[in-house]
Image (cartoon, helix red, strand yellow):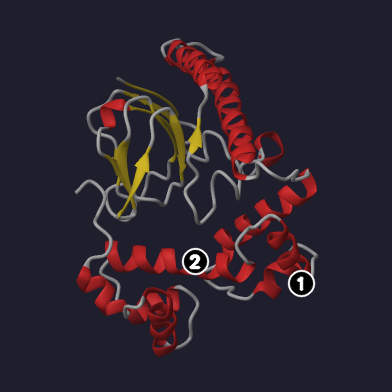
Amino acid sequence: MKLSVSDHNTGGDLLLHNSETQLDRLFYTRDFDYKYFTIAWNRGEKQTVTIDGYPHDFKPHTVLPLMYNQSFYFERSADIVAWQFNREFYCIVDHDTEVSCVGFLFGMNDNVFIDLDDDNRRKLQILLDIFIEELKTNDDIQNDMLVMLLKRLITMITRLARAGKFPDVKLNDDRFHILRKFNLLVEMNFHTQHSVSYYAGRLNKSPKTLSNLFALYNYKTPIQIIQERILIEAKRLLSYTDKSAKQITYELGFDDAAYFSNFFKKHTALSPSDFRNNKKMVPAGK
């Protein structure tokens, strides 16, 4: 079953996939013009989800948020419930104070798998049932109701993800928001800005303060986050596009192709051309 609603005035889309036999995204080709964020819930047995060419275990009763620029497919999509929406339907950046998910659920280098206990599984099932009912109700307040439900969904899984990622420490709101804002700034600027000092300045913090904060919560270092995001994009461009290494060099903010090649090889043990030839990323959808 696939249900959807569209606002032709704003271009806003919300889609709900439930037990669909085909569910995937090919961002750099087929789906480039459809920038949908995805929240996927595995209601079946453990399966494999392939994200940007890399397989991951997708455990039963687990939720996985996915960015609009990730390509993915599921081993058994019929077991998946997935919500998809674009920024025209609900902009998580403009409404960050409402859901506090940007740079955490969405806009991180790592994929966040969120386990559901019995109680939260029940709550999510109730929410799903209401989504289905509202998507089938075509009236003047349908979009408002669906936006409210989407906010509830995002808030719920953000809370669960936060508790799961930082279970042993109390991360207060100010520190949590600094981590999120750093990740968001990297997502928005990694093509041109590669230094920790740039992002620290945007946050009105010193690079040392940022490093100490990230270390306090056993988080990656700021420079690791920046470099990993650059590498993710480089791998995507090498795998899913025909752009030359020189084009990718400049697209990712490097002035010299040799320097980019050395940077890439240092972190992957392969040159850009070897990586492309070895097809380390399998296109989504097989």
Which of marks 2 and 1 precedes in the sequence?
Answer: 1
Residue 2: x %, y % from top left: 32, 23
In the image, taking residue 109 as reference, residue 75 lies left or right, namely left
- Residue at the spot x=20%, y=73% of the render? 277
In the image, taking residue 227 as reference, residue 170 lies left or right, namely right
Residue 258: x %, y % from top left: 39, 89
Question: Looking at numbered disc 1 in the image, what kind of residue is underneath it?
Answer: Lys
Residue 264: x %, y % from top left: 40, 78
Outermost residue, front side: 168
Is residue 4 in view? yes
Is residue 85 in view? no
Q: Nearer the viewer, residue 260 or 96?
A: 260
Q: Nearer the viewer, residue 249 or 271?
A: 271
The correct choice, above or below, for 170 with respect to 213 in the image is above
Give the residue at mark 2: 228
Question: Looking at numbered disc 2 in the image, what kind of residue is underneath it?
Answer: Glu
The correct choice, above or below, for 170 with respect to 201 in the image is above
Give the residue at mark 1: 208
- Residue at the spot x=57%, y=60% of the render? 188
In the image, taking residue 33 as reference, residue 199 lies left or right, namely right
